Amino acid sequence: MTFAIRYTNNQNSLYTMLNTMKLTWELKIIKIKHLGSLLMFSALLSLISPIYAAEIEAGKTLLTKGVVTSDRNNGRVTLKRRSIIFEKDKIRVGNGGRAQFRMSDTAIITLRENSIFHINKYKFKQGRNDNSAILELLQGGLRAITGAIGKNNKKAYELHTPLATIGIRGTDYEVVIVKNGMYIAVWDGAIRVQSRIRNACDLLLGKSQPFVFMNRSGKCKKLNEVPKVFSPIAAEALKAHNQVRAQDKQKPLIWNKDLEEISQEWANKLASSCKMYHHQGNIPFGENLYYYSQSTTVTNAVKEWAREKVFYNYQQNKCQAGKQCYHYTQIVWKGTTDLGCGYQSCSNGAQFWVCSYFPAGNIIGARPF
């Protein structure tokens, strides 16, 4: 079973939509929506716990899942939503856990399970020229969306790992440390990766080369596909979509982490009730839905959508009477550049696949190409 959606030309930006949709995972919202001041909460905290008064506040905990702690003042404290984090904190995320933080300069840092993250230095005051951030990922993985420090003074921001130092150009990037090395991805902007080993890897990652693997010897291997450590379905989803687009001589899509998270969130919602329906309202992304009675793959979902090509009349720019063709037209829509997908199973074993596209296709009155 499939389901497609059509749009008017009156579309808002993707990030405007993220600012208004109430999705669980706050990373999609935080990129454009600043939270309120923490001054009142900080003042209250200083009254309750004077020991923190001399410490430099680095940010605030947005959400935690599982066990999330911080080594602080020769002790260990549990972090919960709204917990303040400080310079010199060493944050640990346990097995199956996850944590997200909004830093004092509005940067967003998301930690994966089994991660150890050290805030070596984090100083930010609006209008000052000596703001700086030195961070250390000792274990596990993180995604970072840089804030004012990285945007205003790129040399003042560094992330250190056991294998390399990462400098940024105002960006959205992700790092995962594995047994035999480290994977790095750039979702927006650019970063410079410099191995700690002399005369080893030193390269710039960005739009033209977004993925790399660095081994324990400091040597880098450039990657052409999204590594499965970042998204287990991205490579397959892109391949399936881009094969269909190539048949109509359309440019290949790229993977978008925000669209992936939107799709996964919606797949989870659909599976919770095992009912299929689209997002409501004038959303700025395209959306294809697929339901199958048992576990399936994104390749199979795309094949089902692409079979609708025979029902599309290009001259009349409409579907054959009584037939569906708008999944196919969304896949090949010329103006669409970004893709993200997610899936989830119902309690009865049936499975939903959701793919989201930006900018949206199926605009009424326009042709796909």
Image (cartoon, rainbow, N blue to C red):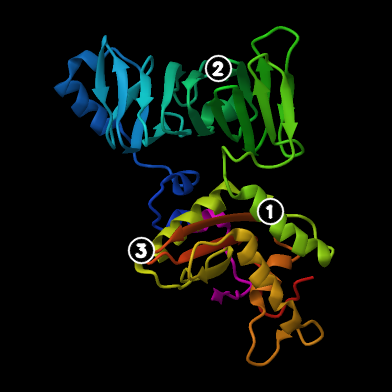
Q: Which amino acid lies under the numbered mark 1 shown in the image of this protein?
A: Leu
- In the rendered image, the vertical position of residue 153 relative to residue 23, given as above or below: above
Residue that label 2 marks? 160
Residue 57 appears in view: no
Residue that label 1 marks? 238
Disc number lying in front (1 or 2): 1
Q: Residue 347's mark?
A: 3
Q: Residues within 10 Å of mark 2 (few under 14, many from 20)?
A: many
- In the rendered image, the vertical position of residue 181 relative to residue 234, given as above or below: above
Upstream in sequence: badge 3 or badge 2: 2
Main secondary structure of the magenta stretch: loop
The answer to whether 301 appears left or right of 220 in the picture is left
Q: Nearer the viewer, residue 174 or 275?
A: 275
State which region is magenta.
1-17
Upstream in sequence: badge 1 or badge 2: 2
Q: Secondary structure at mark 2?
A: strand
Q: Secondary structure at mark 1?
A: helix
Q: Residues within 10 Å of mark 1 (few under 14, many from 20)?
A: many
Percent x, y of residue 131: 50, 19
Upstream in sequence: badge 3 or badge 1: 1
Q: What residue do we see at 46% from left, 30% from top?
A: 105
> In the rendered image, which quarter is residue 253 located in?
bottom right
